[in-house]
Amino acid sequence: MLTEIHQFQQWLRRRSPHSSTHIHYVSDLKLFFNWLSKPCAQVTPQDIDAYIAHSQAQGHASATINRRLVALRTFYRYLNLINDDAPTNPVLPQRHYVRRGRRLPRDVEDADITTFFEVITKPRDKAQFLLMLRCGLRVGEVRNLNLHDLYLQPQPGHLPRLWLRGKGGVERVAYLSAQALAALEAWLTIRPTVKTQAVFINCRGRRFTVTGIQYILAQYCHHAGLWLTCHQLRHTFARHLVEAGVPVTTIQRLLGHARLRTTELYLHISDTQLQADYRAAMQQLAVRLTVRGGE
């Protein structure tokens, strides 16, 4: 089993060399087969049913369960590609995938953002988290950022920018706000000279891991007495754009969303027109109720 999983991981890495999918999928596969203790050829749809029930009893989110099912289904598809007598895929989407309701992005209140950045002491860390808050970078995009991806002195009339590799190796350009640019330049002036091209390096002079960046954020959250995630900083960037009246299609491009429907979710967490309509309606109803109450 370990041989097949290792070969599967190598296949995923060849297909998407800039993606971390192979890490997550392999971890999901090991969790499943350690739980089931069966050869892959003997896994049945009923085993998948039981695994879903087990995962739900453990309190795992629907998104987590579905990701593990996708990892399993992709693994069996891989086996079908390389083996003529491959086992039948036991994951049946219509039967097994857990339905998810529409979940809105969770941003961070501006007061908490202020508190969080007040406890950041290192220029490197301030630059990392400002790239998420002011430019909408994902934590993986911050981690993968290289020195040759920086265009900090553009031609007149153009903004400083970053060249990013997002999900699935899709490239996009992210522009730097004055605040993010100042923080990035402050870090680059003291960044140690090392062989790696990584913009952000740890104390050993190596490129950060995603887990390493998340750990640093957790430490600052502890000092600030609050909790937030890297992706919530990205969500807050989107909310700020909505509140500034930026067109949704522009926000889509800045966030690197493949589908406009994903970006439109942010309109629901900070819809200024909806708030104005609601406020006006409540003012009218308050007058009407006051009059009736006095009759």
Image (spheres, rainbow, N blue to C red):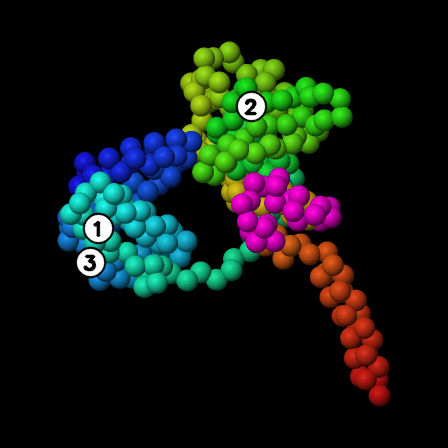
169 or 61, nearer to the observer: 169
Can the viewer see residue 225 in this picture? Answer: no
Dot 2 alpha-carbon crowd within 10 angstroms: few under 14, some 14 to 19, many 20 or more: some
Label 3 Cα crowd, 10 Å radius (few <14 / some 14-19 / many 20+): some
Query: First in sequence: mark 1 or mark 3?
Result: 1
Residue that badge 2 annotates:
149
Q: Earlier in the sequence, mark 1 or mark 2?
A: 1
Asked which secondary structure carries label 1, the reply is helix
Asked if labels 2 and 1 touch by Cβ distance under 8 angstroms, the answer is: no
> How far apart in space, not on screen, are marks 2 and 3 (Cα)?
47 Å
Q: Which of the pair 207/123 is nearer the observer?
A: 207
Residue appearing at x 59%, y 41% in the figure: 255
Calculate the distance from the C-alpha at mark 1 to the C-alpha at mark 3.
Answer: 14 Å
Q: Is residue 150 visible?
A: yes
Q: What's under tag 2, amino acid-wise?
A: Asp
State the mark number for residue 44: 3
Magenta span covers which residues?
A: 243-264
Question: Is the residue 249 above or below the residue 279 in the image?
Answer: above
294 to the left or right of 47: right
Q: Give me the residue at 73% from left, 56% from top.
A: 272
Crowding at dot 1, Cα within 10 Å, few <14 / some 14-19 / many 20+, comes out as few
The magenta stretch spans residue 189: no
Image coordinates for residue 25, horizontal then vertical, percent = 32, 42
Q: Nearer the viewer, mark 1 or mark 3?
A: 3
Considering the image in quadrants, where does the C terminus appear?
Answer: bottom right
- Pinpoint residue 154: horizontal percent, then vertical percent: 69, 21
- Which element is circle 2 on? helix
> Could you tell me which residue is drawn at 46 percent across and 34 percent down?
169
- The Cα–Cα distance between marks 1 and 2, rounded to whole angstroms, is 43 Å
